[in-house]
Structure formats: structure tokens, C-alpha cells
Amino acid sequence: VPGLRQHLVSLGQEFYRRGWVMGTSGNFSIVQSNRPLTLVMTPSGAHKGRLKASDLLLVDGQGRPKNRARKPSAETLLHLEIVRDRSAGAVLHTHSVWSTILSERHRDAGGLAIAGYEMLKGLEGVTTHEHREWIPILANDQDMPRLAGRLRETLAAHAAAHAVLLSGHGMYTWGRTADEAVRHVEILEFLLEVIGRQESRSWPQ
Amino acid sequence: VPGLRQHLVSLGQEFYRRGWVMGTSGNFSIVQSNRPLTLVMTPSGAHKGRLKASDLLLVDGQGRPKNRARKPSAETLLHLEIVRDRSAGAVLHTHSVWSTILSERHRDAGGLAIAGYEMLKGLEGVTTHEHREWIPILANDQDMPRLAGRLRETLAAHAAAHAVLLSGHGMYTWGRTADEAVRHVEILEFLLEVIGRQESRSWPQ
Amino acid sequence: VPGLRQHLVSLGQEFYRRGWVMGTSGNFSIVQSNRPLTLVMTPSGAHKGRLKASDLLLVDGQGRPKNRARKPSAETLLHLEIVRDRSAGAVLHTHSVWSTILSERHRDAGGLAIAGYEMLKGLEGVTTHEHREWIPILANDQDMPRLAGRLRETLAAHAAAHAVLLSGHGMYTWGRTADEAVRHVEILEFLLEVIGRQESRSWPQ
Amino acid sequence: VPGLRQHLVSLGQEFYRRGWVMGTSGNFSIVQSNRPLTLVMTPSGAHKGRLKASDLLLVDGQGRPKNRARKPSAETLLHLEIVRDRSAGAVLHTHSVWSTILSERHRDAGGLAIAGYEMLKGLEGVTTHEHREWIPILANDQDMPRLAGRLRETLAAHAAAHAVLLSGHGMYTWGRTADEAVRHVEILEFLLEVIGRQESRSWPQ
């Protein structure tokens, strides 16, 4: 667990440097054990760039804190849906400028396609740039059980998706390991910036 | 006081890294005591990214330096208005590219609305993304007592506002504590960048 | 070799900081010896911002690893083409937002011209800003021997070119030394950002 | 001199971090003595983000190196014109993306006006945002004596200017001290980014 905790502290610092977890936005979890399901997770309201290892919580499979006074994030239910549906070992929620812009702009379409980029090969299981990644977008919601239910349906309906956007609320991605999840964050944030800059310009015809 | 001073030195370095206090722009204060009102404050003309703890001033409730040769910032009066009207424990003035652009562009409207973003929940007292934050914009002015008077009226007229923009001159925000004020800076600078990038594009119809 | 390895580790960290090698994108090589041809090279699938010196491979002139279990990058053949055609001492492949955008946008034209900038003088052999640099763009391809063949033809057809773009896949540049190759990366990434920002705007007439 | 040298090394690192001296672009000088005129200066072809104190040259009032094998920058003559005309103690040449874009776009107008921004008050002698700063733009030229002559005329014709742009070649600014010159760089780079982002957008009418 010390290793897992330190890993979350370090990636919080790196993501903060890049502007992906400003204020108290974002949250991260790593699966500590599968039986019983236990996550090491960032607490509610913490600044992700200035975490201490002792800030991190252990939560069980119902999202209850195991041994801490500190409050789990309201979004713990979303992490648990992903862990269960994707057999993920880590779930990372970032909140960047470009994911926010694109999640609003493509919300009515229910998602966003990214196709033809070499960078897509960094997503687990993708072996060619001739891949079309569909990132579903869910309407944001403060009712977490309801949002968790919609996330479950979305994950089931898009079994190949590597990430989900919440409108006006950033990105969730995951991986079998924390390193894989970090790789997915870096790749998807890069591609969202590419798409965002391309779409918004008035390129000469 | 050593702790407060070091806090201002550190946040100056971080804000400088992000380009929010270039040149000698920006200024910060933390309330050291309420009776009598005493602020620890950045001095006039200092570089906020290269502060030393000994550069910081103590100023009283009239904006007079208590025990230092160094000159208080001309904008000390603005800090005092905010501390009194909002019962703030810290006031932070940043001067970013996006706040400058938007404060000019929306100046004739007298302010700028930000609505529907999850990031708004990081503002004190906001509990849902279904919130409309109105950021008043004041015309810039070199007459500080006059500007302080207009700021007082604006704070009174917009009791729910978490920040004020000065046209062509950046943002003032605050918090009960320095940490809360820093959180407000990060959230509002993020949202201003989102708004600025969205507004200025010619999105395809 | 320790010096060469440490050099690659350091430049990986710097390029990562700038967002030029996100995820597992990018790869680097330095010629260790010419007879027999031996490259020190980043391995397949490694994160370029978090390399350890021991991650680096030695590969021979056919792209085979000399003494390591770790797998060479599939793009080793591209490095070898460049080393042979340009007598390069180092080859650097970066994968930035702007090179990705421009490599897609100018793909049908087969390349991109950059002319009139002082920064061009940092390219080896260029002595005035009145220079026109043509950067050829190759369609991306997962068939490496085929792509290597097309790269060989492109290098021969554009003997004065300092770099090549792969569409949706970033930039290859090189130098007689690692320092020269790094200089070329910095200069070309700068110029691609300038061109990208200029082209995509609707400047008032 | 050790202090002056270390100052140049440090500001090179900071400007490099911000992308203002990529490749071998940019050059800096500080006046070491006025009688006889002696500058501590960055050498030709050096990377400004990786300077060592021992890389720096002493040059005399004719731009000749005093005690070093290393070659002075071809642009030493420009530094000497500025030192003489403005009685400057330091001259800094940066080469940013935004100064490059604007120096091309406004070249036919012979310059660029910046007015109404609070940030202007950081320029020496400016006391209100109601200031109009005119930044002259000179066509770039590889003939240094000729360019130096045109710079001399431009400085004389625009006695109030705090900086000059060379088209496609970045900015020269200066100060009585190195700190003042650095402040001018930060303020002008900030304002050029604001202007560049504002001008290039198609704001809704």
C-alpha cells in the first residue's frame, strides 16, 4: 500500500503541473485487493497536486471508507462501476480545458470519434492508427447513484471504449494497472487537444 | 506570521510558473489579525515569483505599513474593501492572459456569466454544476480611492460573487483562508480559459 | 555509452515536460559506433519521460537487439534509413500536437514549406532567414519495411530536408550529434507552432 | 562579474522553460563597465537554456571579444546600439512564438500599438494604463552593420519605445539593470500573447 499511495501522490503532482486537476477537481483510485474489493482512493475535496500519502482512503466495494474519518469522494460509485465492468486495476478522472470544451460541444451527439492517429496505438489492444475510438459523453448529474447507473449502461453499450466524458466535467479513463491508466490519460488528453484545436479553427478552404 | 509569509512566497512561485503574475503584476494579502485589522501583504513593485519572506509587509486597516520602509501596493485599499465586505481571510489578485482578454471583451456588459460547469462546485457554497456565476467587471482606474468606492458598491450589489475582474487588469478573488482563495484562483482561471477558448472560435454551424 | 544513455534519459525528460512524447510516443537513437553500426536506442513501449539508463537497447545495423531481452521499437528501421542516408549521429522522433495537426492538414500536398524565419538559421547549413525549408510528409503505415522503403525514397528525393513528418504521427529529425538533433527538434517544433497558429486563424483582411 | 554571469545563466534557464529561446535563438548582454564600455554577453550559437558561466564572453565597445576564443554573436552590434542610445545596463533578445507571429503580421505597418492595459505600467516610466506603447518593427537582415544602422535610426525616431521587433525574428528590449530588462521581457511577452490571441480570433459581432 505505501507504494500505491506514493504512486497516487506522484501522479497527482504531474497532472497538476499540466493543469488537469485544478482546484479540487479530479480523483484517482487504485485497486488494492479484489477479494474483498478494496480501493486506495483520493478523498473528497482534496487538492490532487498537493496530496500527502496519509490523505488517501481505503474504500470497500460499496464505497464506504474502511478505516478513516475523511470522507470519500461522491464519485466513488463511478470508480466502482468501472472497476467492475472493465476489471480495471486503476481509474483516473482528470478535468482538463480541452476535455471540458469538447464534452460540451459534442454532448448532443452523445460522444466523440477519434480516428486515424498513430497515438491511438497507445490505447490497450489497439494495434494500428486505422482505429476509430468512440468516447461516449454522459450528461453531468449530481445524483451519483443515478449517474452510476447511466455509466453502467454506457460501459455495457460501448464495450470497446477506453474512456468516458462527463459533459462540462472532464474524463474518466482506466487501465489494468496504474501505469496503463496514466498512459491512457496522456494519450487521450493529447488527442483531445489535437481534435479541439482542429475543430475550432476556420481553416482556409 | 512566518507560516503566512512562507505561504505567500510559495503561492507566488506557483502562480508565476503558470504565467499569472508576470512582471510586477498581481498582489496577495492574508489577514494576520482582525482586531486590530492587520494584513501580511506583498509590497509595491515586487516580482511575485521571486519573493523573499522578508519582502512582505504588515499593513493596518487604513492600508498604512506598520513596521517597514517598503511601500505598500497602491491596491491595498482594494484588498481592505474585500476583507471587510466578504469577511475574507485572504485576497489574491492575479493577472492572466485569459482574464485580461475576457475583461476587455465583456467590459461593456459589466460582467461575465459562467454556468453549467462541474468546476463551479469548487467555489465556496456552490453545490451543483447547475449554478450561474456572475463575475462583475469594473473599468480600470488609477484613482485608488475612487476605484475602492466602486468596488465596494459592486461587492454589495453582487453579494454572491466569488470574484471581480478589472478591465485589462486581471482578477481579484478571495477566501476565508489562503487555501480557499488559492482554490478560487485555480478554478476561475481554468473556467476563464475554457470560456475564452470557446467564445473566440468560429465553430462550424 | 553511459554518457550516451544518460543523454537520452535527460532529453526524454525535457521533451516530456514540453508534451512532445506523451504516452509511449516518440523514440530516440544515438550512433554508438559506425563499424559495425550500433545504435543506443529507446525500447518499444517505454515512456520517454521516465526512462532509466538500463532501459536503453543496443541494436545492430539490421535493427536486431544486441544484448537485451527488451524489444526494439518497430520504428528502428526508420532510424537506420536516416542514419545511413544522412550520415546522422542521432535520430529523434517527437510527436507533438502541432506536428500532428500540420501533418494531417498538409498531407495531400505531400509536405509543408517554412520560409523567411530567422529561426531557420539554427538548422545545420542554413545561413539566412531567406531560406525555404520543405518538410516532406509521408502517409503513416504500420508496415515498417514498406514505410522504411518510402522514407528512403523521400530522403533521396529531398536531399536538403532536415526533417520528415509522418501523417498523424509526428516528426523525425536528426543531426551529426545528439546536440544538433535536439537543436533541430526545438527549432522545428517552434516553427510548426508558429505556422499552425498562423494558418488556422481568420485574420481580419 | 561572477554575479552578472550567474544572472545570465539563470535567466536563460527561465526563458528556456517558457519557450522564448528555443534552439540557439536569443541573446543577452549586461554592461560590466562603462569606461571602457564592456559587456558580458552570450556567445554565438550557444543554447540559452543550458549556459555555463564560463560560456559567457566579455566584448568591448566595438563588439570584439576581450579575452576568449569563443565567437561573439553576430548581433553584438545591435546590443551596442541599444546600450548607447538608451544608456541601457542590460539588453535581452527573446524569440517567442507570439512575437514571431506579430512581427510578421504587422511588418508592413512598421510597428504595433499596445494600449489600455494595466500591465503597461510595468514598463519603466509608464504610470497609467492609459498609455499607448508603439513597438517598431524592423525588417530582418543578415547584414549586421546595415541592420545596426537602421536600428539606430529607429531608436532615435521612437525615443519613448521600450522594445523593438525584428520581423520573423523576435524582440529586443532593455533596462537600466538586468532586473528591469527581465521585467520588460515578461510584460511585453505577456502583452504580445494577449494581442496575438485577440487579433486572430473571429469574435462574434
Image (tube, coloured by chain):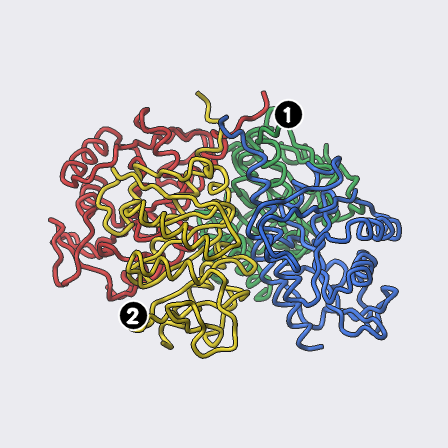
Chain colours: A green, B red, C blue, D yellow
> Of the numbered discs in the image, which one, if any, rests on residue A109?
1
Determine whether, in the image, residue C77 is placed left or right of residue C101: right
Q: Tell me which residue sits at (88%, 53%) in the image.
A: C145
Determine whether, in the image, residue D123 is placed left or right of residue D50: left
Q: In which quarter of the image is the C terminus of chain D?
A: top left
The residue that disc 2 covers is D34
Residue C20 appears at what percent x and percent y? 62, 53
Residue B95 appears at what percent x and percent y? 34, 45
Q: Which of marks 1 and 2 is in front?
A: 2
In the rendered view, tell whether residue A141 sits above or below residue C152: above
In the image, what residue type sits under mark 2? Asn
Co-location on one chain, circles 1 and 2: no
Label 1 element class: helix
Q: Tell me which residue sits at (55%, 38%) in the image.
A: C198
Using the image, name the chain to which the residue with label 2 belongs. D
Q: Which of D71 and C183 is in front in this view?
A: D71
Count of numbered tags: 2
In three-dimensional space, the C-alpha distance between marks 1 and 2, rounded to whole angstroms, equals 68 Å
Residue D31 appears at what percent x and percent y? 34, 68
Residue B166 appears at what percent x and percent y? 29, 37
Pointer 1 with pointer 2, Cβ within 8 A = no
Q: Which of A44 and A10 is in front in this view?
A: A10
Label 2 element class: strand
